[in-house]
Amino acid sequence: MELLMVRFAIRIFVMPVTIALIDAVILIPIGLSIYHVVEELLKGKLDEPMEVLEGVGVVMIGWGVAIEERSSLREIFHLEGVGDETLQAGIDTLCHASGIGLLILGLFSEIAVTAVRLPNHIVPTEGFDGPVLGVSLFFIVLGVYVIVQHIVRLLIAMIWRRVPAPY
């Protein structure tokens, strides 16, 4: 019984509509974070933007890993062959591409924040910490683009029953 409940939960999780909804929900705090970081950086503040950028980077990495492995989840929980497998395989490819993109962009964002956090005798960013954090922010903005494109492509797949090329 427990396995059936887990399998049911995973089936709901890997549905394109669920993934698109989670994408949309994730966009809200990321968008607010971008606005807040820009505002704080323009005031010359660094500590809070670093915390926010680090948190958003972790969210992008985590969500990227989760959607990247959609096909593995379907395989592990024996959800393959349920419905239009060609469509599902295309959605798997789309999720893999978007997930890898979010994972890499989140990691790059984290690297930029870490460069600022490390002592200046290790990574000399003194005097241009703000621009380095701006690079981190740039990777987050690219992540927003990836998420929006992912939502659009998932909607196309759900409505027209065809999966557009990942990018």
Image: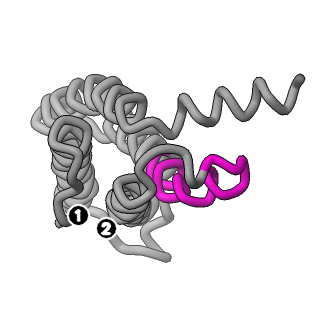
As drawn, is 76 to the left or to the right of 127?
Answer: right
Based on the picture, tell me whether residue 7 belongs to the magenta stretch. Answer: no
Judged from the image, the secondary structure of the residue bearing numbered disc 1 is: loop
- Above or below, 126 against 32 in this view is below
Indicate the position of residue 151 as horizontal and vertical percent values. Answer: 23, 40
* Quarter of image, res 95: bottom left
Residue lying farthest right? 1
Q: In which quadrant is the N terminus drawn?
A: top right
Residue picked out by circle 1: 166
The residue positioned 41% from the left and 50% from the top of the image is 84
> On screen, 46 above or below 74?
above
Q: Amino acid at mark 1?
A: Pro
Instruction: Indicate the position of residue 88 as horizontal and vertical percent values.
Output: 41, 53
Distance of label 2 from label 1 (alpha carbons): 36 Å
**Residue 103 vs residue 82, the one in the foreground:** 82
> What crowding class fits label 2: few (fewer than 14 Cα within 10 Å), some (14-19), or many (20 or more)?
some
Picture quarter containing residue 100?
bottom left
Main SS of residues in magenta: helix
What residue range appears in magenta?
A: 63-79
Disc 1 crowd rating (10 Å Cα; few below 14, some 14-19, many 20+) is some
Q: Give the x, y percent position of residue 44.
A: 18, 38
Mark 2 residue element: loop
Q: Which residue is mark 2?
A: 125
